[in-house]
Amino acid sequence: MPPTLRATTAAALGVVRRFPPVHWVVHQAALQIIKTPWGERFVRGVVGPQAQTDKEYRAWIQAHDTLSDEDRDAIRHHIAGFRRRPTISVVMAAYRSDPYLLHEAVSSVRAQLYPHWELCIVDDGSPGEATWKALTELAATDARIRIVRREANGGIAAATNSALELATGAFVAFLDHDDLLAERALYEVAAELERHPNADLLYSDEDKVDDKGRRSQPHHKTDWNAELMLGVNAVNHLTVIRRSLLTALGGLRGGFDGAQDHDLVLRAAERATPARIRHIPWVLYHWRQHRRPGSFSRARAAECAAAAARAVGEHLERTAQAGAVEQMDVAARWLRVRRPVPEARPLVSLIVPTRDRADLVARCAEGVLAETAYGPIELLIVDNGSVEPATLALFQFLKADPRVRILGAPGPFNFAALNNLAAAQARGQVLVLLNNDISMIRPDWLDEMVAQAVRPNVGAVGAKLYYPDDTLQHAGVVLGVGDVADRVAGHLYAGAGANHAGYQGHLALARNVSAVTAACLAIRKAVYDQVGGMDAEHLAVAFNDVDLCLKVREAGYDIVWTPHAELYHHESASRGSDLAPEAAARFQREVRVMRDRWGPVLDADPFYGPVFDRRYTNYRLGEPPGRVAPWKAADGPR
């Protein structure tokens, strides 16, 4: 598609997204357009770089997600060897159900390779006798199907709670009355419980299925991501919860219809530690997508969004987190938590290492001192042996501002040592590591980063960085990716358009990540000191920021990336490329340090699943995927 047409169409789509009813119509039209090859190319060109087309995804399914009879036999053999085989109660609310789709949903449960299940279905006061008649006939086919009829329609939460009253299993799985479970779904849940018997909440990946059984739009999720859950229900389907926990929570809450599952998962997570929340990185749930008027969530998007905002707001109150919940303009279903800066504002020390390049330093300093709304601040410029007259004159000029200090640090370039030197002399409670080639876009960037950095559970915060041409440079670091054998890390979705929301909104929503770049990184000084700062001995130039973040995570803190702090980054403008001949040997040494120190961690990024191709950072599925099926691995699925 010509760049001008793509840009114009993308801009128009940005406006459309602000009006959910119009956006829904446009989205439905797009679903029809992409059924033709030219239409799919057009739509993908507008929404941004995509990992795979639906046609490619279906080919991938055929190659990697289609069970053979040998696989089924191996699964049954694996189940027979389980030390525990808990009953899983699948609960379903039915209302005016399409008999065919209801039959298909029930059949998907009956086809489960894991036999220890019960299906608890409630007819939520459907008018007439059609739905109840269909349920009665289905219940007669299998003793494990249990049904009940409500006298009056109560809504999704009340109906699901009625179904829960029938449940006797140790765990409860949720299934909509027109959706489908993969035949291995409950087996995968039981296999995960075999490895992690203390799990309280489990969830899987999902995709869409149309009326002809064609699968599309896979959603391969991150492991538990508390920050992302505040912006969107990142768990959704398939969700399985320990029944005793569900009982203690009182089941689903009324008044949250359309976001009742989001509310439930947030409440469950408050009682379950992250170690008891397990993500199964495989598509086990197929969400029905058809042309008829859709579910409650589709038909009443504004009410659902309001319910989700209320659920997140109450979660913040229960967990004593300050913050105002807002619906984002880009999509009504996405939320932003606007966290406040403490009333007693902490002093922030901004650390900028440099060697000459007065043009870059002047622009960066101007951005910090005159274009940043936050205060109080101090700017520490670490002079790594500058000699150019323009730079020395700039330093003299900047020193006239009482907020500026120039710290001399001559010698070979060692980014880690320069930052450590400044951190030791910093007076601020919060440090911001800042490259000299950073420039500001909006004045509130530092408010956002400080509001995140002062949270007690947060160890480091990263920003959304753009190249000067407005394409994406940084949206979090992915571990274990690259086009070389010894993979360390790479930038997520680098090169995407400025308006691109990313895979499942990952470029538009604040979320937990494994690492962020030190080109713009906020961290409390106490945390920096606690983990020993950067490794100046072994990681002088490359990967010292990744290593720092991994030490921070190892110490028990979260790493947060926020799209609401936006800056320009003229990447490595002053120090050059790590691939230059004179730097290649040093770079390879630093690669080896990272692989030796963090190898297993690098190969298992919890926020970038094992099904993705590690040569890319755009969520392209692996050929083959990196995940080993549980029946093929003696030590389980991870």
Image (tube, grey):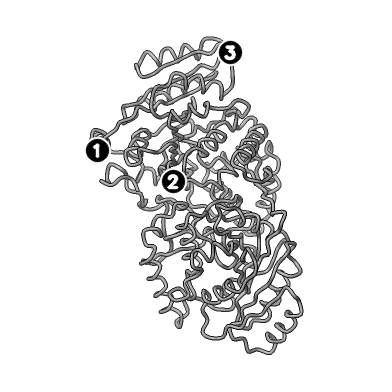
Q: Which residue is mark 3?
A: 152
Residue 308 sits above or below residue 383 on the image: above
Percent coordinates x, y for residue 381 in the rendering = 64, 77
Q: Which residue is mark 2?
A: 57
Which SS class for mark 1? helix
The answer to which of marks 2 and 3 sits earlier in the sequence is: 2
Give the amino acid type for the residue marked by disc 3 in the picture.
Ala
Which SS class for mark 2? helix
Residue 74's tag is 1
In the drawing, does residue 344 fall left or right of residue 334?
A: right
Closer to the camera, 494 or 88?
A: 88
Instruction: Give the distance between the C-alpha atoms of the residues marked 1 and 3, in whole angstroms.
Output: 46 Å
Residue 259 sits above or below residue 55 on the image: above
Instruction: Give the distance between the C-alpha atoms of the residues marked 1 and 2, in whole angstroms.
Output: 25 Å
Q: Residues within 10 Å of mark 1 (few under 14, many from 20)?
A: some
Closer to the camera, 140 or 318?
A: 318
The answer to which of marks 1 and 2 sits earlier in the sequence is: 2
Mark closer to the observer (1, 2): 1
The answer to which of marks 1 and 3 sits earlier in the sequence is: 1
Percent coordinates x, y for residue 220 in the rendering = 46, 45
Which SS class for mark 3? loop
Closer to the camera, 582 or 406?
A: 406
Q: Quadrant of the N terminus?
A: bottom right
In the drawing, does residue 635 fall left or right of residue 454?
A: left
